[in-house]
Amino acid sequence: MRYSKAFIYTLKENPSDTTSLSHSLLIRGCYIYQHASGIYNFLPLGFRVLSKIWKIIQEEMDKIGAQELLMPALHTSNLWLKTNRYYTMDNVLFKFKDKKGVDMLLGPTHEEIITDIVAHFVKSYKNLPLLLYQIQVKFRDELRPKGGLIRGREFIMKDLYSFHASLECLDKTYNDVYKAYTNIFERLNLPFEVVEAHSGAIGGDVSHEFMLITPNGEDKFIKCMNCGYTASTEIAKINKPSFSYSYKPIDLKILEEKHLIHTPNTSTIEALVKHLNKTEKDFVKSILYKDNENNFYLVLIRGDKEVNEIKLNKYLGKEVFLADESDFKSNNWVLGYIGPVNLNNRHKIKIIADYSIVNLKDIIVGANKKDYHFINLSFENLEVNEFADISVATDNDECFRCSGKYKVYQALELGHIFKLGTKYSEALQAYFMDENNKLKPIIMGCYGIGVSRLVSAIVEAYSLENSITWTFNSAPYKIHIITINTDDKIQFEKSLNLYNELISKGIEVLWDDRKESAGVKFKDWELLGIPFLVVIGNKIKDNMVELKFNPNFYKTLKNEIFEKIANYQNLSVEYNQIALIVNDIIEFLNKNINLK
């Protein structure tokens, strides 16, 4: 492609409304253009990158025997009502009525649709296993879209669904997909961590996420610095401490005389820290939950920690919700000052303490009296029914496997795989006849990759403030040619000949043939992020050209691979050798990055 004819309009400055590095660079480099909040156009450069990612995913899906199909983005509500997700995912669903008054929605995911398809066609164990996938536009009505392609309201996903007659068969496919995902991210030269994960709104029992560490990610995971265990902070288990608990109540008179302190207008930890000149670790927070049967649970947790509601629900075996103001009022509990000592209607509440409060001394808790707290208590003075691991894992928490220390990483989710079981097949009547003529629900797996998000992920992984760095297999073009002075006949003709020769060898080239200054051309090369640059300028009179590498390209490759081509960077080379050198570099990288 000749730059003079290309749809490329770069920006010098960061757009004021961008919220991440990739968001800014992709707009400045004319890769994407915003249509509305969380909705983006993929411009020609961006679509080239997206297409390359798309192709790699298709190739790896083909290798494991997955068949591609395309399902509708527009859904009727009937299947979603059968799985109840028409209501449980209401916060992100785009819902509307068509002209006939039928309830419709834009698909955020396709478990219902694919299960309905398979239920219609698959009747026997002889038709299983079956792997079907699509790459499709999805829609989620995000309240706060963020980071450009990182969290949008319209996005592109690859979702693969597998169907099985046995758990053993599901396990094999799950492992095959795990390996395929590893291949995809390695071919894209994306650094990633695989972590145990929560299935969320999709459901299922076993789940893993593929994560990219980046400060602009919206997820967090922990990694044990000793044994390497990794898990999302949503489910990461924390080592149970050694302790012996025996409740030691304090006489009410002594409580009033020695432990009660006036703390006006301090219903939050932040206010208490400031008022008492303490740290968050000096407090025990008391948070009231209830279930659908109006059973109440008071959760105790150290002041610097947060309750992990996923863990709490799993521990209780039911879903619980924060109690509301009416619950406090009707039971004579004091909102903002509730605590486990001298609690009214104590018989109505089960008190569950997180392990973080174990062995604490000189702690402060709510006194069940407005504007008052109890101070200088020990954890034995708190009336607790049960202890459990129900907090969000944080830095320096102990690993439940080896007692090593955790480190928390901010991360961007690249892909997510689930063992769904029979949740959807039972709800949507997807049954098969087994070898003994018994009717059974089909066992399912679900495997997603954020295809459009990967475009941002690559930029986040390697780029600088004013310079994109694409990995070899994602770059829109492999070679960028700059002609310093296009009015110079020799420079122009030599550039044109090289451009045509590289194209004839099947190499993707962007030739900057514009009548712009050299400074503008070099800045645009750095912004666009194409891996290799050939500069044709005054040295061409001596039959010499320059070969340069993108400043951060070396970071995208394994050391042993980059070492093989490192001698070619910032190199002056004879013109008649440049096409051969470039071709050799491209062939070498193709061979060593693309897995067999």
Image (spheres, rainbow, N blue to C red):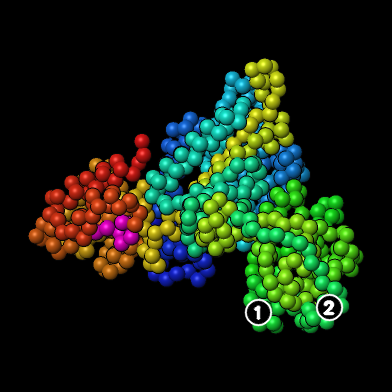
Q: Residue at 14% across / 50% down in the picture?
A: 577
Left or right: residue 559 versus residue 314 is: left
499 or 546: nearer the viewer: 546
How far apart are the two marked residues, 2 and 1, measured between alpha carbons?
23 Å
Residue 137: x and y, percent?
56, 46
Q: Amino acid at mark 2?
A: Ile
- Residue 254: which numbered mark, if any? 2
Residue 431: x and y, percent?
68, 26
Q: Which residue is mark 1?
A: 278
Q: Residue at 28% across / 69% down in the picture?
A: 519
Q: Residues within 10 Å of mark 2 (few under 14, many from 20)?
A: few
Residue lying farthest left? 542
Q: Is residue 111 above or below residue 39?
A: above
| Highlighted magenta segment, given as a residue range | 548-554
Q: Amino acid at mark 1?
A: Lys
- On whether residue 552 falls in the magenta region, the answer is yes
Q: Residue at 18% across / 59% down in the picture?
A: 571
Residue 418: x and y, percent?
59, 41
Residue 549 makes an appearance in the image: yes
The quadrant in which the C terminus is found is top left
